[in-house]
Image (tube, rainbow, N blue to C red):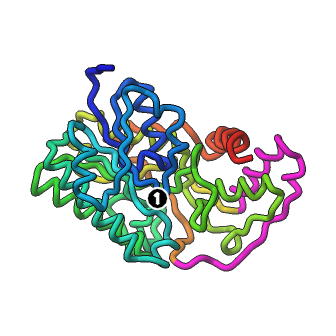
Amino acid sequence: MSTNLPRILVTGGAGFIGSNLCEYFLSKGYPVVCLDNLATGHKKNLDGFIENPLFKFIEGDIRSLDDCKKAVAGCDYVLHQAALGSVPRSINDPITSNDVNVGGFVNMLVAARDAGVKRFVYAASSSTYGDSEALPKVEDKIGKPLSPYAITKYVNELYADIFSRTYGIETVGLRYFNVFGRRQDPNGAYAAVIPKFVMQFMKHESPVINGDGNFSRDFTYVDNVVQMNELAITTNNPAAVNTVYNTAFGDRTTLNDLVHYLKHELAKKDSKIGEVEVIHGPNRAGDIPHSLASIDKAKQLLNYNPKYSLQQGLAIAVDWYWENLK
């Protein structure tokens, strides 16, 4: 099946965000290559489009330069999502987080450079703001990192900047803020809070909030993230590349309010969920108290206009979780 649209490589394409990107760009008629080692991604995330003739899956590891070169061959754009996420994981095993998030990142940059890729868009992180207490978070004001994971994501930004300056490859970093939505894995020690809480509520188990529940986050529905990735590869504005952007909704919600919204949505499907109590535990090492993004830069340079608030996204996500996690 032929197409005149550019070919896109999505690293980590069998993961949560990556699979949503693959699905979206395939639906638009783009040929898509997915590189994933299935360490945290899942083949089942590709079920809806694995047979699409425009789709190619490569099982490989970004820690292998040969795998990176194989995947990027013939591609016009890279959407680099592959990484080991999670602050606690990086605290428990900083070496592997660094090998994947820094070593793998440099491998992908080198492979993209050598293949003549037009633009390299990568998943950066709000963790880069570190101990900066300023709210909202503005791209050019960051603090000291608070975890090995945060260091790796900041180093990604530094490497991308150097590759832009030294080799002329266009790069765009997207600092993701607490992304949630369909295909986000609720299982494992490092599961994200929303799918983990949903699964516990569905089992009538009490979720544990770290701290008093007044920490707040800029929860961001995955389709807003997809929109930002599309804008990052399609913009023709020279001022919009070789920089980083907050990728968020631009509002913050406490964990206590999040639980309230989740129970409200889930109680529509099972009224007993509304009666499940929440447990409060100790604060988690490396956690920042509050996170809120300024999205002014993305609005001005990329014409970003996030379509989904937390509550709009939760309504859609809960439907998906209900159908797929039971």
- Residue at left offset 63%, top offset 59%: 187
Report the residue at 27% width, 52% height from top: 67
Quarter of the N terminus within the rendering: top left
Taking the image as drawn, is residue 245 in sight?
no
Query: In the figure, is residue 6 to the left or right of 133?
Result: left
**Which residue is nearer to you in this view: 142 or 80?**
80
List the residue tagged with mark 1.
39
Is there any visible trace of residue 32 in the rendered image? yes
Closest to the observer: 122 or 144? Answer: 122
Q: Does dot 1 land on a helix, a strand or a loop?
A: loop
Image point 14% across, 42% down: which residue? Answer: 116
In magenta stretch: residue 269:
yes
- Residue 208 image-quadrant placement: bottom right
User: Which residue does the image show at 55% across and 45% down from the upper left?
Assistant: 221
Instruction: Give the amino acid type for the residue marked by disc 1 in the picture.
Output: Ala
Q: Is residue 75 above or below residue 256?
A: above
**Above or below, 76 relative to 122:** above
- Residue 210 location (% of width, % of height): 66, 72
Q: x and y percent of residue 268 in the render?
A: 82, 41
Q: Residues within 10 Å of mark 1 (few under 14, many from 20)?
A: few
Would residue 282 be counted in the magenta stretch? yes
Of 43 and 208, the residue lying toward us: 43
- Quadrant in the rendering for residue 257: bottom right
Q: How many marks can you see? A: 1
Segment colored magenta: 256-285
Q: Position of residue 139 (x, y in %)?
A: 35, 58
Vertical placement of 162 versus 239: above or below?
below
